[in-house]
Every structure is written in C-alpha cells, then in structure tokens.
Amino acid sequence: MKSKEKVLVHKGMDRVKRKEFEEAIEFFDQVLEMNAENADAWNNKGVALYSMNRPEEALEAYDRALAADPENLEALRNRAFVLRAMNRFEEAIDTYEKIVYDEPEATDFRNLATVLVGMGRLEDALGALMDAANLEPSIAIEREIEALRRVIMEITIRTEFGGEFGGEFGPEDGDGIGTDRPEEG
C-alpha cells in the first residue's frame, strides 16, 4: 500500500474510533478511488458501515476486501460476525470454518460455538469450545464449557424423563460465548 493510502486509511480508522462514520467512509472512499483493490480500506469501510447499521453494505465491503486479499483474516472475521448478527448461521459457520482451518484463535472457536448454539447444535458447540480451551486455556472458556454441559444435561434429562424444555438458547442469550465485534485493521 502506498504511503498516501496508508495515511488516509489511518485517518479513516481514527474517525471510526471517534464514531464519525460518515467521515471515515469518505477517507476510505478516497483510498478506493486511488486503488480499488485496497483490502484495508474495504475492510474498514465495512466496519464503518456496520456501525451505521448497514449490515448488507458491510458484507459487500468485506467481500470486496476478500476479493482483493483472500488471506485477510480481519475481513473474514468481520464478515463472519456480521453474518452471525444477521442470523445467517449457515453462512457464518462456513466463514468461521475457513478461519479456524487457516489460523485459528480461541475467540474464533468461541464465536463458532455461539453460531452452533444459535442453531441448536449444542454438542458441536461444546466441541468448538473445547477446541478454544485447547488453544487458550482460561477460566472464562471453562465456565462456558461447564454452562453448556449443564444445558445439554438438562435437555437430556428432560427428554428422557418427560417434560418439555422451556428455554431457547441462541447467540444473544448473554451466555458469554462469542463476544467479538467487527475489527479495524
């Protein structure tokens, strides 16, 4: 990336941090006029668009970032986050699986677990949390594992011994699983 492009991207990122999203987009658009293949400008434009409650446009920006740089993990993570927030779980899973295949971090597995919980795939979610714990052991992840085990056990007991399970478990239940946000970068 040329130095002028870098300066403009950083100015735009600064505006995002200040929640001046329209101004941020103006800076990113200036970069994209100079170089339509600037993945950082596209990714950060996506962050600004999502922050303005324009998720479809944010996804388009992340897709453009990934077209310019297929290895851009920030854009891939941001895309997965937005898909998850839009309850487009199948697409989110596909995206998270690409991330955890390439360069997994514990947070990626935790976010994948959130999507799987939202789809009712609790055993798979437990496996994702265990993968997270293997990468980065922490008390928080262990608590998430134990909470999910309790839920699975409760469902199993209610199923085997009668009664209906009354709770819905989804990504917005405040369970502490998967706490990412679109990232600048």
Image (tube, rainbow, N blue to C red):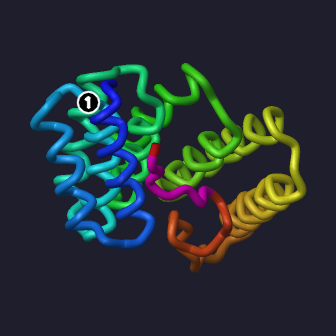
Query: Does residue 112 lie above or below 65 as drawn?
Result: below
The residue that mark 1 highlights is 38
Which SS class for mark 1? loop
Where does the magenta region start and end?
Answer: 178-184
Is 115 on the left-hand or right-hand side of 3? right
Q: Which residue appears farthest toward the left when viewing the image?
A: 33
The quadrant where residue 152 appears: bottom right
Q: Is 169 contained in the magenta span?
A: no
Q: Is 180 contained in the magenta span?
A: yes
**Magenta stretch: dominant SS?**
loop
- Relative image position of residue 66 (x, y in whole percent): 30, 28
Hey, what amino acid is under mark 1? Asn
Q: Crowding near pointer 1: few (<14 within 10 Å), some, many (20+)?
A: many
Say which residue appears at 17% left-offset and 53% top-offset: 57
Q: Please state, as top left, top right, bottom left or bottom right, where the N terminus lies in the image.
A: top left
Say which residue appears at 30% left-offset and 60% top-offset: 48
Is 37 on the left-hand or right-hand side of 11? left
